Image (tube, rainbow, N blue to C red):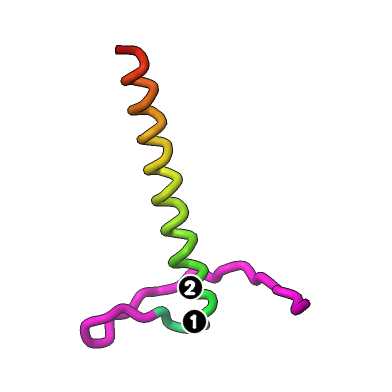
Amino acid sequence: MEDIRVRPLKRVDLVTPGLGQAYRGVTPEEQGLARLSGELSGLKEAITRLQNEIEELKKK
């Protein structure tokens, strides 16, 4: 099985070439990890909101 090595993500500056956004000095893998990290944070916040709403509904 192939070993997977994870490097700390470096702080990146966003640039906007044309219509899209690109990461300067970041590999596609790092870019994907940063995007997934952001999506996971969003999901965590959504789950927390739903849990709070469920608790509020239980109180009614």
Residue depicted at 53% across the width and 78% down the height: 29
Q: Does dot 2 land on a helix, a strand or a loop?
A: helix
Q: Does dot 1 land on a helix, a strand or a loop?
A: helix
What predominant SS class does the magenta segment belong to? loop
Residue depicted at 44% across the width and 67% down the height: 35
Give the magenta range.
1-22
Residue 53 within the magenta-colored segment of the rendering:
no
Q: Which mark is residue 8?
A: none
29 to 38, vertically: above or below: below
Inspect the image, locate mark 2, and give the three-letter code of the amino acid beneath it: Gly
Q: Which residue is mark 2?
A: 32
Q: Are marks 1 and 2 in contact (CB under 8 Å)?
A: yes
Counting labels gives 2
Rendered location of residue 37, percent (x, y): 49, 60
Locate the N terminus by quadrant.
bottom right
Q: Quadrant of residue 24?
A: bottom left
Residue 10 within the magenta-colored segment of the rendering:
yes
Residue depicted at 49% across the width and 69% down the height: 11
Label 2: how many Cα within 10 Å (few below 14, some 14–19, many 20+): few
Rendered location of residue 45, percent (x, y): 40, 43
Front residue of 55/23: it is 55
- With 18 as the anchor, is 30 left or right in this view? right
Residue depicted at 31% across the width and 78% down the height: 21
Q: Which residue is mark 1?
A: 28
Label 1: how many Cα within 10 Å (few below 14, some 14–19, many 20+): few
